[in-house]
Amino acid sequence: EADDKKKALELSLKDSQTAIDEMTGLISTLSEEISALAAGIKSLDKAVSEATAQRQEENADFKELMANDGTAKEVLAWAKNRLNKFYNPKLYQAPPKRELSGEERITVNMGGTLAPTTLGGIA
């Protein structure tokens, strides 16, 4: 009976040792997978930050392009209006009358001239 208990305990010990070895292997495998996933997350974060920087740069370029496009359209409209003044006076639109401040009215009434203004922010 003592031998049977001893063999049973030895088998139980071997089974426990086998289970421990399997779990240790499984733990190391899972640790490697976790490390690989962490590296993947870091590379994704880097890719996202690079893509964000690229989008911000493209957005800034687009805004600059749209601003330049708007300015070009203003210049073309101004030039077209000036050409209409000479070639097609019916289509010419005179610039709006400028509202003078008190100082400017005094200057004009005294025979002075005002500083020229730019049309539509165009120098």
Image: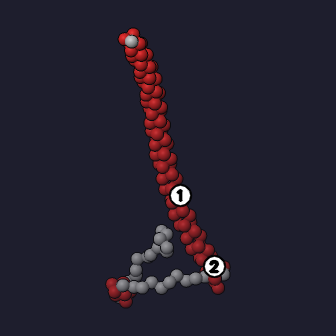
- In the picture, measured across the screen, residue 99 lies left or right of residue 65, that is left
Above-or-below relation of 68 to 5: below
Question: Is tag 2's residue or tag 1's residue first in the polypeptide sequence?
Answer: 1
Dot 2: element: helix
Residue 38's tag is none
Residue marked by disc 1: 62
Q: Of 13 and 75, which appears nearest the observer? A: 13
Q: How many marks?
A: 2
The answer to whether any part of residue 52 appears in the image is: yes
Dot 1: element: helix
**Residue type beneath disc 1:** Phe
Q: Which residue is drawn at 41% across and 13% down?
A: 4
**Color encoding of the figure:** secondary structure
Q: Position of residue 91 (x, y in %)?
A: 64, 82
Q: Residue at x 63, y 79 (%)?
A: 84
Residue at the right extreme of this rendering: 87
Q: Where is residue 88 in the image (x, y as percent from the top left)?
A: 66, 81
Q: Which residue is drawn at 46% across and 30% down?
A: 30
- In the picture, measured across the screen, residue 77 lies left or right of residue 99, that is right
Q: Split into 4 quadrants, where in the image is the N terminus?
A: top left
Q: Residues within 10 Å of mark 1 (few under 14, many from 20)?
A: few
Q: Of 69 and 43, which appears nearest the observer? A: 43
Q: Where is residue 72 in the image (x, y as percent from the top left)?
A: 56, 66
Residue marked by disc 2: 84
